[in-house]
Amino acid sequence: MSDLVTLTRDGDIGIITVDNPPVNALSPGVPEGIAAAIDQVVADSSLRAAVLIGAGRTFIAGADIKEFGKITSGQKKREIGLHPVLFKIEDSPKPVVCAIHGTAFGGGLEVAQACHYRVASPTAQVGQPEVKLGIIPGAAGTQRLPRLAGVAKAVEMCAFGDPVGAADALACGIVDRIIEGDLLAGAIAFAAEVKAPRKSRERGSKLGHAAANEPIFAAAREQARKKLRGKNAPLRAIDAVEAATKLSFEEGIREEARIFEECLFSAESKAMIHAFFGEREVAKIPGLPKETATLPIRKAAVTGAGTMGGGIAMAYVNAGIPVRLKEVSEEALIRGLSTIRKNYDRSVSSGRLSREAAEQRMSLITPSTTYDGFEEADIIVEAVFEGMQLKKEVFTELDQIARPDAILASNTSTLDIDEIASATRSPHRVIGHHFFSPANVMRLLEIVRGKESSPEVIATSMTLARRLAKVGVLVGNCRGFVGNRLFHPYRREAIFLVEEGATPRQIDEALYDFGMAMGPLATGDLAGLDVGWRIRKEYQHLEKPGVRRALIEDRLCELGRYGQKTKAGWYKYDDNRNRMDDPEVDRIIDEVREELRVKPRAISNEEIVDRILYSLVNEGARVLEEGIALRAVDIDVIYMTGYGFPTHRGGPMWYAASVGLKRVYERIEEFERQHGELWTPAPLLKRLAEEGRGFDA
Ligand code: 3H9
């Protein structure tokens, strides 16, 4: 047996403990350890049953995901997988009871399914989240789960990957008992009660009949195509569960293995595994020691109760942190609060939140038209209108009101954080917290480090992001930071392409088909075209004369077409925000083309996707070279969590590397020849392409 798995005893019950921190993944040595422990239990005549449990904070959270990369890169040979140990558990002549706490995910749940019985603590979660890594369960999860939980539940869990709580797991038959109090003691008591082993693979009664199952599969496929657009693994997971209903168990696991293998080597899986580790990598800040002190955040204050400020207040109270919310007038405050109330009401009516929880969260918000109470806050977030002068005035005030150790965060989306900090006497405590709209929903938080932001303020911001259920990404200070700086050329190219002959709909559909949550022009309409217009005007003096400018959007704004909020932007909208083409926009486009003497040409979707995405990549390479982004993966995470970039494409930098940087570079050179200096290749991209390397190599 290995150190990773130990066997102890309590009377005649063997206790097999998996101890592989942090999440007890099934790394090399763990399956072997479990197998050896089962052998020992079976061989020991003084033991009549066994309990399998995880040490530390969780049961087994799945296969070791790091191993997948080694297999697909050819570093490691693909092994037979987990089947031998699972059969060993299931074929044990002595009952094996699995005791679940924390998360039994993926291979962890598959191990649990091979046990004869399962008990769980009330807060435990079980799940088959493999599709979130672009794969399917590969250790008979698609075969044993429908036998335990029924076909509908298995399809839901395997195709959509969301976790299931203990009570639900009990109701559908995955778990046999919930143990209140000490889990191990409860599991031992349960093991003492059970008489004989019970093999999950032989329990066929829940597999149902073809006539009843077909609508389940059809509905799941339709939902997967819609909800998980562009992803293949969810559809293949449904195929594998369907195989369980049509084939013998042995044939079923062979079919599952075939599909698993196909998914594991797919571009989708590589990109999604990159996204998984990327989200964790961004939390690690080179040069910031792990032991940097963080400041306790018990109370927060937000100034500005508009769309952003209201959403930010919600993010805080959702995490249990009370917030003082300030607006300039009673009227604006009431408007802001009523939007927050409406958002919570919507969550209650959709069943996502209980009425009590919603009321409790509302009660954590103390509205005010003054700075009263701001002196108690550990952090103050400024979410006023995006204008440098106003922000500086607000920061001068906050600096005087705030406790000397309180953090002062600006929710600016583009402005110079150092200039904002210069309005205070304590720039070391000023930092950017750039939330994305809606701030209570979107997972990204760009944390903008000013040149004087202290290590404690940075470390606290990173920890706080996690507490607010956000992915915090630390970025440097420049106009637009990482996200919006890259978004500028991305949207500019979209507008150029319209000038040259594409229709707004063609552009949006091409990017949507690539996998973006929304096309660039429709996104502009959603966010409000006036925001960018105002920023362009503020920075007009910095524009280089003679460089091509995108004109159409400014024209739309001049006509008051700000997007969805004015029911007119690149499209027109009805009362339900349904998007429709607008002949008025065609007229404006024709006008601009005439002015520019452009003869519209037919533009392929391939050109649209290349131009729009490679503009992101080229700017991304600059941002990387300048150190504004710490790593290429930080850019990827920003785009996947804040800008709707599809996870199965791994983010713009990953996507470029998967196309091949040399190919991307050559295409950018071609665009430079056609369209001029806005396409000058980033020096880093040129160098990496010439050296045949990727971004993070
Ligand atoms: C699978 O099981 C396939 C099977 O069908 C079998 C096929 C044969 N492997 O997220 P955290 C690391 S596929 C390796 O911050 P939390 C993570 O990178 C797998 N490493 O903690 C991080 O490292 P670091 C199916 C893993 O408390 C550290 O652990 N299972 C794994 O917020 C802490 O992670 C899944 O997809 C892993 N499986 O959340 C579950 N899991 O500190 C994936 C975590 O160096 N994991 N790490 O950055 C999760 O969803 C969350 O980690 C979990 C804990 C909810 C468990």
Image (cartoon, rainbow, N blue to C red):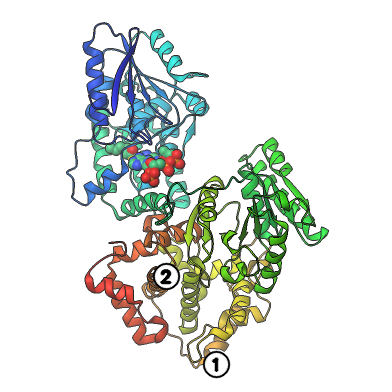
Foreground: disc 2 or disc 1: 2
Q: Name the residue under label 2.
A: 623
Secondary element at image label 1: helix
Q: Can residue 166 be seen in this view?
A: yes
Asked if the beta carbon under badge 1 is closer than 8 A to the nearest atom of ligand 1, the reply is no
Give the mark nearer the N terminus: 2 vs 1: 1
- Residue at 82% x, 58% y: name it: 330
Give how far apart the Cα atoms at labels 2 and 1 are.
Answer: 34 Å
Q: Is residue 479 left or right of residue 282?
A: right
Q: Is residue 141 left or right of residue 492?
A: left
Q: Residues within 10 Å of mark 2 (few under 14, many from 20)?
A: many
Tell me, for residue 488, which label it has, or none. Answer: none
In the rendered view of the protein, which quadrant contains the N terminus?
A: top left
In the rendered view of the protein, which quadrant contains the C terminus?
A: bottom left
450, 272: nearer the viewer? 450
The quadrant where residue 347 appears? top right
Tell me, for residue 595, which label it has, or none. Answer: 1
